[in-house]
Image (cartoon, grey):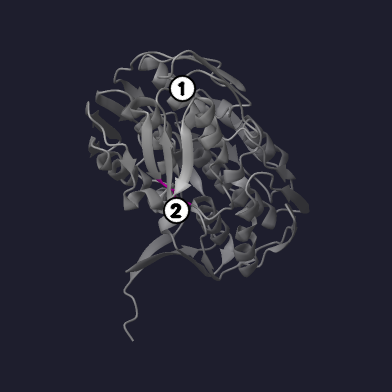
Amino acid sequence: MSEHFDVYGGARLEGEVEVVGAKNSVLKLMAAALLAEGTTTITNCPEILDVPLMADVLRSVGCEVDLQGDTVRITTPAELSYRADTPAMGKLRASVCVLGPLVGRLKRAVVALPGGDAIGSRPLDMHQNGLRKLGATTEIAHGCVVAEAEGLHGAQIWLDFPSVGATENILMAAVLAKGTTVIDNAAREPEIVDLCRMLQQMGAQIEGAGTSTLTVHGVDELRPTTHRVVGDRIVGATWGFAAAITRGDVTVRGVDPHHLDLVLEKLRLAGADVTTFDNGFRVVQPDRPKAVDFVTLPYPGFATDLQPFAVALSAISEGTAMITENVYEARFRFIDEMKRLGADARTDGHHAVVRGVERLSSAPVWASDIRAGAGLVLAGLVADGVTEVWDVFHIDRGYPHFVENLNRLGARVERITTSPDRG
C-alpha cells in the first residue's frame, strides 16, 4: 500500500492550532532514560511515527516502553544490553543518540548506523571524537558504531561545528563520567536546553545550558524522573509560514515565541502582522508577501529545517529572494520539486535565487524529507488545481495530525491510500 496527499489549491488558512512536544527533543529524552534504572515518564509527546520507532530501539536493549497518547513511560532495567542494532535504528536519524547513554552507563555500545532524512552528509566524526576524549575507543565496523571504555573521565572537548547530535551524545556520556567535562562550541538549541533540564532533574550536574559552553560535573548515578517535552518550535514556525503563504490568519499555541524570534521577524519583513503571547503567537498576512532573504545557521540563527518553507514563501512573494543554505547541502533537492509546481528558482552552490510568481501550478511532487514534504503541501495550497504529494510517510514522522490540523484551518487536503499495481 502507498499513500499520498491530494492538496487542493486556493486555501486561506484561518483559526487556531495547538503545537505539542518537539520531535527534535522527545527522541533524545527517551534515550536519556537509559541512564537511570527505574521508570521515567515523558509527557507532551508528539504522536508521530518516530516515537514508536525509538520505543522499538529502547526495547531492543531491554527496556519496557508504554505509549499512551502523549505520554511515554520507559522502564529501564538494572541489566541493559549494550547492542542497539535493531532494524528500527536504520529508520530514523535520532536513533544514534542511544550511543552516549549506553557508553556512559555500560562503558560499551554497539549501535547501528542511523537512517533518517535524505538531506546531505551528517557524519559521526564529532560524536566519536568526543567519546574518545572521554576515554572510549570507537570505530565503525559492520555497519555499527562500536565503542568501549574501561572508564570515562572528564575532558575538555571542542566541537568543530555546534552539532546538536554530537552535543547530545557527549553530554549524555559525560554525566556519569569521573570528573568535569567542558564542551565548547556546543549546540544552543532549545531542545538541548530541554535535555539538560531533564538530566538535571535526574541528578546530573550541568552548567551553561543554552550557551556555547556546557560544563558537566560527573555523578555516580542518576534517578528516573517525570518531564514535559518543550513545545516544537519547528512545527510552530511551519504554521506561521502557512499563514503567510496563504495570506491567512493563524494563531499558534503551545510554543515559546522567543524560540522563534528570528523567524517571526522574517515574517514581519514579509509583510505579516505578528503578535506574541506567553505560549504562542499569531500571524496575519493581509496582502501578497514581500520577498525576504534567508540564511540558515545553527541556533539562534534561522534553522535549516525551515529552509523549505522559506523557499515556498519566496516562490509566491513579490520580488526576488536569496536563500543561503549553510548546514545541509542536499536541502536544495526541495527546489527541484518546487520547480514542478512552477516556481522560478535556480541554485548555485549553497545559494538559491527565487523570483516570486503570482501563483503556482499543480503537479505530482515527492517529499525527500519531513520538512520538504510539509513545504510541498503548503505550496500546493496556493497552486491551481490539485497537487499530489507523494512519500508522505516523511511528513508523518514529524507532524502529528497534519492533515486534520490543515483541514480544521480551512484547507482541503485528503490522504489517499492506493494498492500497488499488480500488473
| Residue depth check, mark 1 versus mark 2: number of the one nearer the observer | 1
**Circle 1 residue:** 174
Query: 230 or 314: which is nearer to us?
Result: 230
Q: What's drawn in magenta, residue-wise? A: 112-116
Farthest residue to the bottom: give it: 423
Q: In this rendering, is residue 64 above or below 338?
A: above
User: Would you call the spot at circle 2 few (<14 residues within 10 Å), some (14-19), or many (20 or more)?
Assistant: many
Helix, strand or loop at label 1? It is helix
Residue found at x 67% / y 42%: 296
- Where residue 2 sits, quadrant-wise, is bottom left
Dot 1 amino acid type: Ala
Dot 2 amino acid type: Ile
Q: In this rendering, is residue 155 above or below 358?
A: above
Judge from the rendering whether residue 105 lies leftward or rightward of residue 237; answer left or right. left
Instruction: Assess whether residue 214 is covered by the magenta stretch.
Output: no
Asked whether residue 20 is in view, the answer is no
Asked whether residue 145 is in view, the answer is yes
Helix, strand or loop at label 2? It is helix
Circles 1 and 2, Cβ within 8 Å, touching? The answer is no
Q: Reading the chain from its start, which is encountered first: label 1 or label 2? A: 1
Where, quadrant-wise, is the C terminus in this rendering?
A: bottom left
Q: In this rendering, is residue 16 above or below 395?
A: above
Instruction: Assess whether residue 114 is covered by the magenta stretch.
Output: yes
- Where does residue 233 sit, x and y in percent of width and height? 51, 35
Magenta segment main secondary structure: loop
Farthest residue to the front: give it: 150
- Where does residue 341 sit, x and y in percent of width and height? 61, 67
**Circle 2 residue:** 395
- Where does residue 306 sit, x and y in percent of width and height? 59, 45
